[in-house]
Each structure stands twice: as C-alpha cells, then as structure tokens.
Image: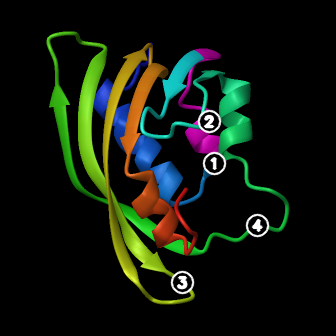
Amino acid sequence: MTQSPTPAEVFHRLVHAVCDERWQDAIDLYADRTDVSHPFAADQSPMLSREELRQHFTPPPGWTSPIRRRPGNIRVHETTDPEVVVAEFEYQGENIASGERFAVPCVFVMRVRDGRIVESRDYIDHARSARARGETPR
C-alpha cells in the first residue's frame, strides 16, 4: 500500500507544476470536489470542482506564456491540523519579451486529504502578477 503524499509535498508538487506549465499535473492534485478561492481577486468566484480548475488552468489554443517563473523563498508551516499547511513563497522569474525580473509574493492555506487538495485559499498579489506578464492590472 502506498502512502499518500503529505500536504507539504502536495504544495511543492503544485507550485512546481504551475511554474513548469504542467497544467494537467497541477489539476490532478485537486480532489473532484474542492473549494479553491483567490480572496485578493475580487472578480473571481471560488472554484468548486476539478473541472472548474481545468478551465482555470488550461490556456487557450496557441497561447504562449509571456513569463518564465520558478517558486522561491518557500516556507511551509505545518499546523495542529494534519491536513492543513500554510505556505509562504514567491513566484520569481522574468518577462520573456522585456527581460524584466519579478517576484510575486503568495501565501497558500491548503487542506489536503488523501493526497488531494480539498480546500485552498490562495493569497496572491494579482496586480504584481499582471505587471509581470506585461498586462495592466485591474
């Protein structure tokens, strides 16, 4: 019998999959029914299923990322609840066209059960993330 990955291991797998644009690997880390929200993104509703996350993560045909990124300054804090971790980190990288470097601070509060994310609150600096991609923040 194989043991499920710990919540900290799931977090690491998630941020590396996102940074490497391995979207299906990221999607597979979530439970079929989940509750994922980005509280700092006022215009985004919670995502409550793996299918909603697939729509969130899947880029349109022909899309090419304007950035290269990697996770940095990772600090994972275990809690008294064995299913919950709090992870502080940055998406670090550069805009491919301009060469401008960026660091986008993030805090994820994740609940992982049986190796799958069942709940996550992802606090991301969305304005800084948009600027990193060369977009005008909303």
Report the residue at 63% width, 48% height from top.
23
**Numbered circle sitting on residue 96:** 3
**Mark 2 and mark 4: span between their CA atoms?**
18 Å
Identified by mark 4, the residue type is Trp
**Numbered circle sitting on residue 27:** 2
Disc 3 crowd, CA 10 A, few/some/many (<14, 14-19, 20+): some
Residue 80 versus residue 75 in the image, above or below: above
Residue 102 among those drawn in magenta: no
Q: x%, y% of residue 115?
A: 44, 21
Nearest to the eye among marks 2 and 4: give it: 4
Looking at the picture, tell me which residue is in the foreground, 36 or 44. 44
Identified by mark 3, the residue type is Ile
Nearest to the eye among marks 4 and 1: give it: 4
Looking at the picture, tell me which residue is in the foreground, 111 or 56. 56
Residue range corresponding to the magenta coloring:
23-33
Report the residue at 70% width, 29% height from top.
52
